[in-house]
Image (cartoon, helix red, strand yellow):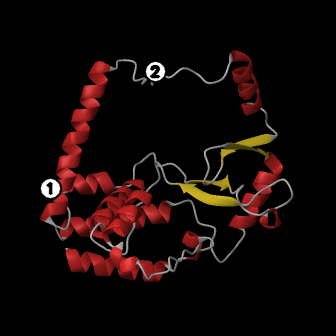
Amino acid sequence: TDTTRENLRQIDEDTDKLISKFSKSNKSNKISSGNKPNINDVEKEAFMSLKDTESVIIRKADKSNVFVILDKKNYIDECTQQLSNANFYRKLNDGLDSANNIKHILSVCKIQGIFPDKLLNYLAPPPDAKDRRFYTLPKIHKPRAKWFNENTPPGRPIVSDVGSIDNKINVFLDFVLKNLLSGVPAVIRDSFDFIEKLSKSVESLQNCLLITGDVASLYTNMDNSRSLKIARSFLRKFQ
């Protein structure tokens, strides 16, 4: 839509201004927080030595601001077990077919005049595209009975898409869908948004019971076809 195109143009201009300003004022391209280190030199040396140890993996824990030291073999075995689940993962080719499919779809968009040329160039797969990187965040909050083994918690699967063939497309879709979802009452952005919604309905909630739930492996269990159908319906409704 015209609104989306104008928003993208404004984002592009603001980004160029920010980069230009940063380049002029920070020749070294380094940002200093001004905070003093919270560990001494001996502790820092110990951490650096641990980081270079080949037999361990250091990962930030899922849902907590701590780091976890894992046995490398156990970590790889747990990741392999997840990737071996044929219900959620399948082996792909080298990605060339996907890149060609994206180029074909973008060429159709160009012919039909759906997107301006500048946006099409932005969405195109980069010639030096990187492979996606799979890793996990250890769920140390889970009960020991659910751990992979006595020393290895289950991991939350993450696939880093930075620099991949469709990374820019994902960024664009995230921007568009966030704007659409902002007007949906059932969507809660974060804890602050949740509290704000409750405060506006506190009187009508006097006789209500608050119930919470947790979906196991939410993203891997989502029905992709249904998710795409819902996204299309929102796009058609608000375009």
**Dot 2 and dot 1 residues touching (CB under 8 Å):** no
- Judging depth in this view, the residue of 15 and 126 nearest the camera is 15
- Judging depth in this view, the residue of 57 and 46 nearest the camera is 46
Amino acid at the residue labelled 1: Glu
Amino acid at the residue labelled 2: Gly
Horizontal and vertical percent position of residue 229: 38, 82
Return the residue at label 2.
Answer: 34
Horizontal and vertical percent position of residue 233: 30, 81
User: At 66% across and 23% down in the image, what residue appears?
Assistant: 39
- Judging depth in this view, the residue of 143 and 20 nearest the camera is 143
Q: CA distance from mark 2 to mark 1?
A: 38 Å
Horizontal and vertical percent position of residue 151: 84, 53
Return the residue at label 1.
Answer: 6
Observer able to see residue 74: yes
Q: Secondary structure at mark 1?
A: helix
User: At 79% across and 58% down in the image, what residue appears?
Assistant: 77
Horizontal and vertical percent position of residue 194: 40, 65
Q: Quadrant of residue 132?
A: bottom right
User: At 72% across and 69% down in the image, what residue appears?
Assistant: 84
* Tag of residue 213: none
Observer able to see residue 104: no
In the displayed structure, 154 sits above or below 65; it is below
Q: Quadrant of the C terminus?
A: bottom left
Q: Quadrant of the N terminus?
A: bottom left
Q: For this view, does 46 lie left or right of residue 93? A: right
Label 1 neighbour load within 10 Å: few <14, some 14-19, many 20+: few
Q: Quadrant of residue 85?
A: bottom right
